[in-house]
Image (cartoon, rainbow, N blue to C red):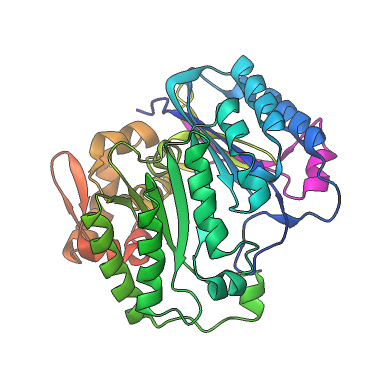
Amino acid sequence: MLKTPPLSLYIHFPWCIRKCPYCDFNSHTLRAELPEMAYIDALIEDLDQQLPKVQDPPLVSIFMGGGTPSLFSPSAINYLLDAIRKRLDFSTDIEITLEANPGTVEYQRFAGYCAAGVNRLSIGIQSFQDHQLKALGRIHNGNEASNAVMAAKAAGFSNINLDLMHGLPGQSLKEGLGDLSRALELDPSHISWYQLTIEPNTEFAVRPPTLPIDDAIWELQVQAKTHLTKNAYKQYEISAYSRESYICKHNQNYWEFGDYLGIGAGAHSKLSDAENQTITRAWKHKNPKDYLGRKNNFLAEEKLIAQEELAFEFMLNALRLHYPISIALFEQRTGLSFSTLTGPLFEAEKLELLKVTKTDILLSDRGKRFYNDLVTLFLPR
């Protein structure tokens, strides 16, 4: 039976100083003055329109992503968090993350974000190599990246994530491990280690750079994992490594098929209705101008997830995790009997992609490497 899962809140800030050539997120180059308070007021109204759909659980996490949320002042973030606190209960150990660029202007604001209630900072480093940062269209350099992390610690942040990319244009094994070593010297609590992929509708899709071959990327991933493990970082998801107790609660809730409200231009929501045994996805208007112009209805579309799609939706998320997936969790988050997975699981076991016990699904090393092939086994047939 479907049970009400934990609830998170995602807040999207759609503007950047410059759009990166690899980015397929809903981000837009800021070409005029930032409509700061108009957007904050719209976010609050957006939340108000969704409150009737929210059931009992308090918020376990808030994630402010983008775009570049650190374009917004600490006073604006404080105003927004106060408004949310008046409308929704916060769990006693709520995680509140803000994504930030490592530019000088942003890191001068870190103390203000900390005072506003942000307790986790995610800094978009991507690389410490200046030539790679230039190729990626980033507006900071390697020294600014290091300085930003030190500024975050000085401002009072103990929970800091660094976003790093690998498989970059012309990147050697030495370069990739060099970026990782420099990140480890800064002693963050969490590292997100993403492989650069060429996404449709990006500048790189039109003018693709030359990337390392698959075998070279795999060797870098293997050596990076060894290096991270030796430094007490545990991999708990395809691209996520954390020190003990610093797993990202917000992303973990996604991967475990928890619920989340999304407010802001293009933000997505997923909400469970335990009474009616249904799960609904919804998303907002993507263009910031359209979003700001629709204060009576920010919703672009919503739809029920069909019963026959639920198993795939759950496994698409949960199979990213590098720890056992509870059979009970599958039944609680989907409302389906575990028997609905019998066929795909048998096929996956035969291919040595995972193992099933009486209580859990265990991903094999082969399954971790061939995640994309594994999840296709759970597509509706």
Q: What is the span of residues highlighted in magenta in the rendered image? A: 278-305
The extreme left residue here reads: 358
Q: Residue 328 placed where, x, y %?
A: 26, 34
Q: Is residue 181 left or right of residue 105?
A: left
Residue drawn 26% across and 62% down?
A: 227
- 299 inside magenta stretch: yes
Residue 336 lies, in percent from the top left, at: 34, 37
Residue 130 at least partly seen: yes
Q: Is residue 67 visible?
A: no
Q: Nearer the viewer, residue 379 or 221?
A: 221
In the figure, 322 relative to 95: above or below?
below
Q: Position of residue 320 (x, y in %)?
A: 35, 53
Left or right: residue 1 compared with residue 86: left
Q: Can you tell which quarter of the image residue 22 is in?
A: bottom right
Looking at the rendered image, the quarter that the C terminus falls into is bottom left
What residue is shown at x 40% (from left), y 80% (from top)?
A: 172
